Amino acid sequence: MNLTEYDGKYVRIRDTHGNVYSGRARYGGVDLLECEWGMDEDGIFIEDILICYSQIESIEVIVPHGTVELQTEHIVLRRYRPDDAEQLYQQFGTDPEMYTHRTGAKSSYVSKIIEMEAFDMGFFELAKNRYSERFFDPKPVEQEKLDKILEAGRIVPTACNYQPQKFYLIRSKEGLEKLKTVTHFHYNVPLMILVCYDAREVWTNPGDQYYRNYNSGEQDASIAATTMMYEAEELGVHTIWIRGFDSKTVVDTYGLPDHMIPVMMLGLGYPNEKAKANAWHYKRRPIEDFVFEL
Ligand SMILES: Cc1cc2nc3c(=O)[nH]c(=O)nc-3n(C[C@H](O)[C@H](O)[C@H](O)COP(=O)(O)O)c2cc1C
């Protein structure tokens, strides 16, 4: 058996212990293995697993069908971070015989895993991949993640650094039941953050002909909400931005003080099996509609 001929090919290896490995083979020459592993034989790496020549029971070249297929093309690689890849590997390996499994982790359906590369999304990918989630699983958002999300909302810029943003957590049974009475857009979220600003703390323009009575509360609260939204995305928590509610009803229902001005609600949670972006998400106007030279 000449192992060099398998270098770079997709193979399935059965070892002498009955383990089966599949994936792209990387030939490990005896020279390399001798100095790094103290071995006197060559072998094949699949990922970072080394199968030595003497341990190979059988090796066959397999035909790759593709890379990773997820049921919804728009979810492809969405949640595809090192953690997820690790979990997928553990669950499915890289065997091409695998098809149509629910990953469980992120409600994606994976078929024919042949090769996966985990990568960290940069902010641009994160921003591009975010969509408004409207199908939530009851699973609660972990406190650790929520703390991070809230922290992201704390450290944002605000006008004159007055920091008037307030976050009300709606996640108790009672709070969530009330939510259904104040907005149609509750989507059965396990956690809603009602983002407000405090009218006593907000920066207010002393008044000129353009900005009379203007205060920065909506902007301050929105930047906090936006930052929390992307932090959630980063942590694999899906979100929905909700403004479809009557502010007075919200204030009355939850007994908020009069100086608390609701700006929006951020729904957070994990997607259920129906999760997907809706058609609006894919309708984006061209850049010329947004950018102008002055
Ligand atoms: C200010 C604002 C208010 C919104 N209010 C609601 C809402 O009340 N209900 C809802 O289902 N989605 C709401 N959305 C979500 C938008 O419909 C959604 O962002 C838009 O259609 C683009 O889709 P995408 O977020 O999936 O890319 C709101 C978004 C923003 C920014």
Image: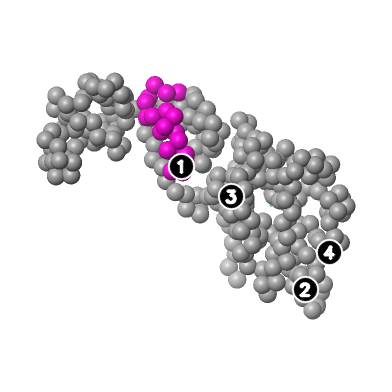
Cα separation, mark 4 vs mark 1, equals 43 Å
Identified at 56% across, 33% down, the residue is 107
Q: Nearer the viewer, mark 2 or mark 3?
A: 3
Residue pictured at 41% horizontal, 42% vertical:
118
Disc assigned to residue 144? 3
Q: Quadrant of the N terminus?
A: top left
- Expressed as whole percent of the image width and height from the top left, the position of residue 99 reads 45, 23
Disc number placed over residue 260 in the picture, else none? none
Which residue type carries mark 1? Asp
Check disc 3 and give the amino acid type. Answer: Glu
Q: Dot 1, crowdedness within 10 Å: few (<14), some or many (≥20)?
A: few
Q: Position of residue 213 (x, y in %)?
A: 82, 72
| Dot 3: element | helix
Range of residues picked out in magenta: 80-99
Residues 173 and 292: in front is 173
Say whether disc 2 or disc 3 marks the residue closer to the N-terminus.
3
For the residues labelled 4 and 1, say whether their Cβ atoms are less than 8 Å apart.
Answer: no
Looking at the image, can residue 226 be seen?
no
- Residue type at mark 2: give it: Thr
Mark 2 or 4 closer to N-term? 2
Q: CA distance from mark 3 to mark 1?
A: 16 Å
- In the rendered image, which quarter is residue 10 located in? top left
Q: Tell how many labels.
A: 4
Amino acid type indicated by mark 4: His
Seen in the picture, residue 62 relative to 281 is either above or below; the reply is above
Q: Does the CB distance between marks 1 and 2 fall below 8 Å?
A: no
Q: Report which residue position mark 4 lands on.
A: 259
- The CA distance from mark 1 to mark 2 is 45 Å
Q: CA distance from mark 2 to mark 4?
A: 14 Å
Q: Which percent across, then down, holds residue 221?
A: 71, 61
Q: Quadrant of the C terminus?
A: bottom right
